Image (cartoon, rainbow, N blue to C red):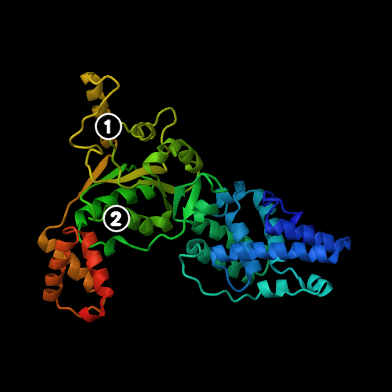
């Protein structure tokens, strides 16, 4: 195996601590004959254990060795893979080197571990190449990456030679991209994540805009702006404002699901993290995706200065906001600040300073070129939301009249009429057998 991995060119930057290269070194030791049997077996088991850990995180199954090699190809960021993402094959000398590497990966796929197993009297490689994983909830593993990597793994298994592997992998890069940013939908800021400032959010829901009842004009405006953005046309930062539970956040999450396949990604950023926005933008500005920086429930209280960092990014500062980045925010306040504002400065009597501070915060809202209002539904709209949601569940046998009567009682006890209240009412019905 070592004689194969040592000849890699394009994929030379694979982490030296990776399972692949550590197993490669183990195989070199084995082939040299210069090893202590128990020590070598111990080293092998360490790598098998690491492979099982990765397989658990990403829900791999059947041939874990193939899944792992496909995972390496899908996650390795280098000039070749980054140029290939969303673009596909580019003619040039580098392709000859890439074909060489893909030939090596095909040999790694077909690597025969039987000699090492027989000599050391172990069977762990046989087990991991014919594995039957316990079916897990998608909450436990990263389903988004898992499905794509297993698909790639199976395609490489069926490829006959280096040329076919080359086509399979470059097609994969074109369809899905490469690395964490390519294979995941959504991210948050993390100071602890080993791969950089962004950490994948692995449990996003599959909600689409059609699942959100009502608010047709609002959804249409959001779709128009987002489509312009993903197609590379001029688009605006968006502020969705209005009452709680009306579907502002749900709309933005649905937009992500709707346009993910067209290269849209989302990064959730909280107010206390605004200072890190320049680092986030630096990490994504040269990638071939469109990023929405999503800020939920955005508003500013007295003494808070985080808005200054956001404003600097929106206005560009010395480094203009890249064309592949937009900001989408939700807020209960149209102007992002308390309507009954009483800003205090260090000098309590400095009316001019106070006025300037208020104006500066008000001007932040103006940086959102599109503002969309989401309001509490009227009674008839609320009942329409309830009946529409209920009819998506055939097991709910109540008539419309019964639903409306029960939903009216529910909203009076649970915070008034809203899309969220309607959904909570339906959820309660689904868990209450005697109402069917």
Q: Is residue 377 positioned above or below 327 on the image?
A: below
In the visual, does 187 lie left or right of 340? right
Quadrant housing residue 400: bottom left
Q: Element at badge 2?
A: helix
**Badge 1: residue crowd in 10 Å (few <14, some 14–19, many ≥20):** some
> Dividing the image into 4 quarters, which one contains the C terminus?
bottom left
Work out whether residue 436 can be spotted. Answer: no
Residue 264 spot, x, y in % from top left: 41, 52
The circle on residue 361 is 1
The circle on residue 251 is 2
Quadrant housing residue 384: bottom left
Residue 337 spot, x, y in % from top left: 24, 37
Work out whether residue 360 can be spotted. Answer: yes
**Badge 2: residue crowd in 10 Å (few <14, some 14–19, many ≥20):** many
User: Which residue is found at the position 67% from the left and 48% from the top?
Assistant: 13
Quadrant housing residue 257: bottom left
Q: Element at badge 1?
A: helix
């Amino acid at each position: 195996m070592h004689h194969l991995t040592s000849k890699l060119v394009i994929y030379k930057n694979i982490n030296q601590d990776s399972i692949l290269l550590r197993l490669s070194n183990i195989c070199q030791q084995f082939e040299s004959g210069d090893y202590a049997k128990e020590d070598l077996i111990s080293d092998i088991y360490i790598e098998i254990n690491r492979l099982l850990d990765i397989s658990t995180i990403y829900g791999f199954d059947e041939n874990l060795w193939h899944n792992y090699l496909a995972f390496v190809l899908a996650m390795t960021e280098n000039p070749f893979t980054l140029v290939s993402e969303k673009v596909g094959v580019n003619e040039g000398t580098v392709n000859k080197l890439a074909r060489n590497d893909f030939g090596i990966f095909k040999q790694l796929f077909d690597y025969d571990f039987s000699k090492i197993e027989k000599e050391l009297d172990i069977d762990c490689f046989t087990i991991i190449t014919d594995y039957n994983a316990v079916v897990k909830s998608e909450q436990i593993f990263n389903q988004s990456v898992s499905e794509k990597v297993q698909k790639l793994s199976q395609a490489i298994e069926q490829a006959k030679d280096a040329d076919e592997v080359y086509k399979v992998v470059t097609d994969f890069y074109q369809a899905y991209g490469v690395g964490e940013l390519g294979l995941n939908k959504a991210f948050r800021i993390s100071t602890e994540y080993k791969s950089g400032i962004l950490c994948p959010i692995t449990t996003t829901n599959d909600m689409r805009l059609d699942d959100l009842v009502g608010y047709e004009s609002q959804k249409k405006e959001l779709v128009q702006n987002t489509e312009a953005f993903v197609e590379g046309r001029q688009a605006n930062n968006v502020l969705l404002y209005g009452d709680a539970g009306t579907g502002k956040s749900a709309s933005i999450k649905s937009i992500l699901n709707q346009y993910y396949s067209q290269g849209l990604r989302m990064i959730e950023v909280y107010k206390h993290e605004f200072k890190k926005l320049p680092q986030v933008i630096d990490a994504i500005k040269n990638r071939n995706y469109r990023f929405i920086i999503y800020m939920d429930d955005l508003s500013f209280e007295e003494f808070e200065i985080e808005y200054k960092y956001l404003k600097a990014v929106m206005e560009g500062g010395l480094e203009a906001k890249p064309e592949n980045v937009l900001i989408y925010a939700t807020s209960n306040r149209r102007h992002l600040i308390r309507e009954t504002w009483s800003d205090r400065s260090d000098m309590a009597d400095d009316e001019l300073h106070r006025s300037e501070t208020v104006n500066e915060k008000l001007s932040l809202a103006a940086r959102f070129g599109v503002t969309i209002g989401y309001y509490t539904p009227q009674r008839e709209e609320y009942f329409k939301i309830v009946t529409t949601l209920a009819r998506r569940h055939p097991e709910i046998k109540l008539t419309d009249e019964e639903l409306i009567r029960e939903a009216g009682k529910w909203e009076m006890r649970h915070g008034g009429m809203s899309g969220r209240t309607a959904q909570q009412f339906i959820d309660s019905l689904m868990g209450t057998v005697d109402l069917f």
